[in-house]
Image (cartoon, grey):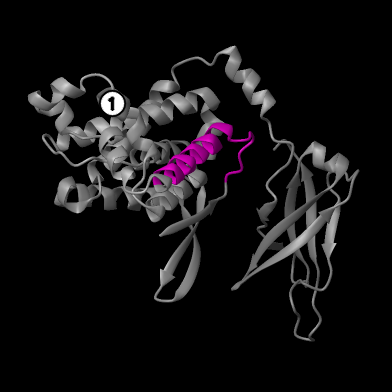
Amino acid sequence: MIPVRDTIPSKNHPIVNNVLIGVNIVIFLSQLAMGSSGDILVYVFGLVPARYSVDSVFYYFFTGPGMVSFLSFMFLHGGFLHLAGNMWFLYIFGDNVEDQMGHMRYLAFYLASGIGSGLIHIAFNVGSDIPVIGASGAIAGVMGAYLLLYPHAKILTLIPIIIIPWFIEIPAYFFLGIWFVIQFINAAMTHGDLSGVAWQAHVGGFVIGMALLKALEMVPSVGVSKRMRRATRKKKTETFQVVRPSPHGEGPDIHGDVFITPFEALVGSKKVVNIPWGFHKRLFRISIPPGIREGKILRLAGVGKTMPDGKAGDIMLTVFIRSA
């Protein structure tokens, strides 16, 4: 299952999430530029359980890279697919979690989830000299928090059936629940050293993320967070919107809603709307004229229901103005 997008729009620009994605990409490109020396980087700044469980090794790594690697390991990746998969999941789920927590809390939460997942990996792989790298544990924490915050959100998911792509909207609690069960089964059946995947870190990160979310909810927000929220507030709603059509009576017209911000109502905007109707999921580009008022109806002529006489109705989109 590959998530494509979720249905929860964020109200603020996810600046921390975007920076984390950018830093991971830059570091990976640096790894590639180093060539074979990149392997040394992985062993120095990856998380090696033996450093903390074997006395003779712990002596040499108690400071320096031994401590730094608790942070650095989550910014290293073993290949393009490893990086791409992690960054895509972070892109899908991270913006909404940051939107709910606030920027600085989210950064602390992300790093704490990653460190916690690393500790879980060490606990289950005592004495291992194989380094673990990747943001998977921290991102698992983000997914755990998303599950608690938005359990009923819909995740547009790609399910490849042989060579046929099948898109379906899945409730977040089901998508993330299935993901967690898969990680848990693999963690129970496979030793991290042999599989090449830190399954225990995934499971641990997910659970730690849920626990950290509950802990952060008890900590009051400070003035800096509120100022940052105001500074990063979005002026526009999502460019791509899914419209849930509802037929009015037996007529040929299809009715739906499109959402814009006060800023977009003032200056105008362009949207791409996806209108599922039966087995069809059609995309339409619409223009929002400047100065539009709430309740105004935009008409897409001739693309509604086709009646028995061959005539097609219209799609009628009612404009609603709200904060992003």
Q: Position of residue 284 (x, y in %)?
A: 74, 64
- Element marked by disc 1: helix
Query: Looking at the image, which residue is at 84% across and 69% down?
Result: 301
Q: Is residue 19 magenta?
A: yes
The residue at which mark 1 appears reads as: 65
Q: Position of residue 302 (x, y in %)?
A: 82, 73
Query: Looking at the image, which residue is at 22% across and 51% down?
Result: 196
As rendered, which of 288 and 59 lies closer to the eye? 59
Question: Which amino acid does the dot numbered 1 rest on?
Answer: Pro
Relative vertical location of residue 103 with respect to residue 130 in this rendering, above or below: above
Relative vertical location of residue 252 with respect to residue 172 in this rendering, above or below: below
The quarter of the picture where the C terminus appears is: top right
Relative vertical location of residue 53 with respect to residue 33 in this rendering, above or below: above
- In the rendered image, which quarter is residue 275 located in? bottom right
Furthest-right residue in view? 291
Q: Left of 13 or right of it: where is 206?
A: left
How would you classify the magenta stretch by its main secondary structure? Answer: helix
> Can I make out residue 173 in this image?
no
Magenta-tinted stretch: 8-31
Q: Residues within 10 Å of mark 1 (few under 14, many from 20)?
A: some
Query: Looking at the image, which residue is at 40% across and 60% down?
Result: 1
As rendered, which of 229 and 45 lies closer to the eye? 45
Query: Looking at the image, which residue is at 19% across and 42% down?
Result: 130
As rendered, which of 252 and 132 lies closer to the eye? 132
